[in-house]
Image (tube, rainbow, N blue to C red):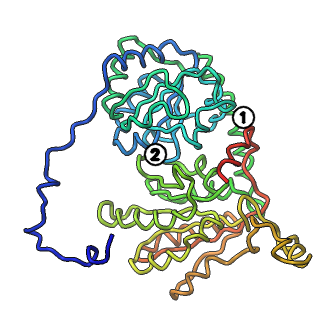
Amino acid sequence: MPATLLTAEVDEDQAQLDYYAADPITLGHPAPSLVSQAADALATAQRPLVIVGKGAASARAEDAVRKLVEATRVPFLPTPMGKGVVPDTSPYCVSSARTQALLKADVILLLGARLNWMLHFGQTPRFAKDVKIIQVDISPEELHNSVKSEVAVHSDIRPFAEALTAELAKRKFSLQPASHPWWKTLQEKQTANAEFVKAQSSDTSVPLNYYAVFKAVQANIPSDAIIVSEGANTMDIGRGMLLNNLPRHRLDAGTFGTMGVGPGFAIAAAMWCRDHAPGKRVVCVEGDSAFGFSGMEIETMFRYKLPVIVVIVNNNGIYGGFDKETYNDIQSAGDVTLCTPPTALSNEVRYEKMMEIFGETGHLCRTVDDIQAAVKKALAVTDRPSIINILINPQSNRKPQAFNWLTESKL
């Protein structure tokens, strides 16, 4: 926008507000024949799956989507910013068996979700070769992207979900988690993965791993907090460990996987909270590399007195760094620019000391007790941001992945 527009003033009675006072936009309803086709596909599926995208959150379709899931008991996966449309704590959420659910599903209902890199473009080997896609989207240009949908529905999510729920009720369609083979397959995988996460998150040895960090953060932040997250492993592991039970309460790197958006998102969220939800907290969980892109936005948070809690999960690198001894050996081996990998960051950077620029004190954490105390102190602050710098094992990693091509595509 030109500077003249940004600095211009106009009398309120001369503003053309009638443009914005029109009748509410009428929701786009689905063609009944397409609803019937979608119901047929789901009702005859052996392994159905619902994927709830951020489009469902933007459409404010949470009530309708929750009723659909609860009535049909079809397992669902949320996309990162679709989290909370149906609570992460729902018994029908199978995020902990995500790989198995995507790979084995024979019919998938996409509710406002794109088949982009976050969903592996709907392609093998992540998806079954003959999987049938039911795609529902308000944007017709999204239909048939990446793969051709079996049923493509141009509609708002809410009226479609309501119509589909009614149509499936006529067919008395509902899976029984206690006995259906598909549910048994997913529950076995959930149990196995839960054991891995429990073991990792219970390991509080120093230096900490990601899972122990996220368990401590999750246990101490408000359940209705808006979570902003970005990074490599920080964002990926955090999606499963930091829960959302309310819609539109998670912001992350999004469709384009853009690093550096976190602090800006957190500022916008905190400004919204100030006007619309006083007392609601914003927790910005950053990888150390991601924080480096936009870390000086901490000044903006101070300037506007925004109580954003910035949590930096510091592993000395992008995906992984080096311990102090190894880092020093690499640095002394010769030309620093040739010997130091570009994904390795400086060892144990004291990001929390940025608070001292503004006459305040940050929090350096090495243990779970440190994290608990730091979060408690940060929640007590209501007129400025806080920085919690958590030093973790540079070699801490996520659960081994069967499909590493996703990681390569992100880079």
- Residue positioned 58% across, 43% down in the render: 118
Taking the image as shown, residue 81 lies to the left or right of residue 328, namely left
Asked which quadrant contains residue 68, the reply is top left
Q: Is residue 401 above or below residue 269?
A: above
Q: Position of residue 215 (x, y in %)?
A: 63, 54
Q: Quadrant of the N terminus?
A: bottom left
Asked which quadrant contains residue 216, the reply is bottom right
- Residue positioned 74% across, 61% down in the render: 208
Total number of numbered labels? 2
Nearer-N-terminus badge (2/1): 1
Mark 2 closeness class: few <14, some 14–19, many ≥20 residues within 10 Å: some
Identify the disc placed on residue 245: 2
Q: Is residue 38 above or below residue 392?
A: above
Amino acid under label 1? Ala
Residue closest to the eye, 258 or 179: 258
Taking the image as shown, residue 314 lies to the left or right of residue 230, namely right
Q: Position of residue 94 (x, y in %)?
A: 58, 34
In the picture of the structure, the residue carrying the numbered disc 1 is 192
